[in-house]
Image (cartoon, rainbow, N blue to C red):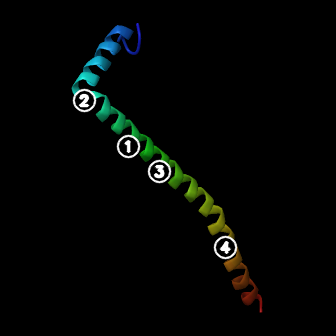
C-alpha cells in the first residue's frame, strides 16, 4: 500500500502516462516555471518581513516627538 491505497506501480503508470501525454520538454518547462514562481514568492515574503521592523521603528520615532510636544 502506498498513498491512500495507491501502490507504487499505479503511481509509476500514472507518471508514464503523464510523460507520454505532455512530453519531457513541456514538463521541464512547467517545473522551471513553478520553481521560479516559488522563488519569487519566497523573495516577496522575506522582503515584507524585513520592511515590518523598519516600519515599526519609524512609527515609534514619529510618536516620540508628538508625546514631547503634548507635555509642553
Q: Taking 47 as reference, is 58 above or below it? A: below
Question: How many angstroms separate mark 4 from mark 3 (CA)?
Answer: 27 Å
The residues bearing labels 3 and 1 have C-alpha atoms spaced at a distance of 11 Å
> What residue is pinned by disc 4?
58
The residue shown at (34%, 38%) is: 29
Residue designated by label 2: 22
Q: Secondary structure at mark 1?
A: helix
**Residue at the spot 25% in from the left edge and 19% down from the top edge:** 17
Q: Are marks 1 and 4 in contact (CB under 8 Å)?
A: no
Residue of label 1: 33
Dot placed on the residue nearer the N-terminal end, 1 or 2:
2
Residue at mark 3: 40
Disc marking residue 63: none
Q: Nearer the viewer, mark 3 or mark 2?
A: 2
**In the rendered structure, are the residues bearing label 4 and label 3 in contact, judged by CB atoms less than 8 Å apart?**
no
Crowd around label 4: few <14 · some 14–19 · many ≥20 (10 Å): few
* Residue 2 horizontal/vertical position (percent): 41, 11
Instruction: Say which element carries label 3.
Output: helix
Indicate the position of residue 18 as horizontal and vertical percent values. 27, 24
Q: Is 41 situated left or right of 59 in this image?
A: left
Q: What is the secondary structure assignment of the residue under circle 4?
A: helix
Amino acid at each position: 500500500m502506498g498513498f491512500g491505497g495507491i501502490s507504487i506501480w499505479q503511481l509509476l503508470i500514472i507518471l508514464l502516462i503523464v510523460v507520454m501525454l505532455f512530453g519531457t520538454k513541456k514538463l521541464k518547462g512547467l517545473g522551471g516555471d513553478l520553481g521560479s514562481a516559488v522563488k519569487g514568492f519566497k523573495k516577496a515574503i522575506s522582503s515584507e518581513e524585513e520592511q515590518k521592523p523598519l516600519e515599526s521603528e519609524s512609527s515609534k520615532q514619529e510618536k516620540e516627538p508628538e508625546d514631547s510636544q503634548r507635555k509642553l
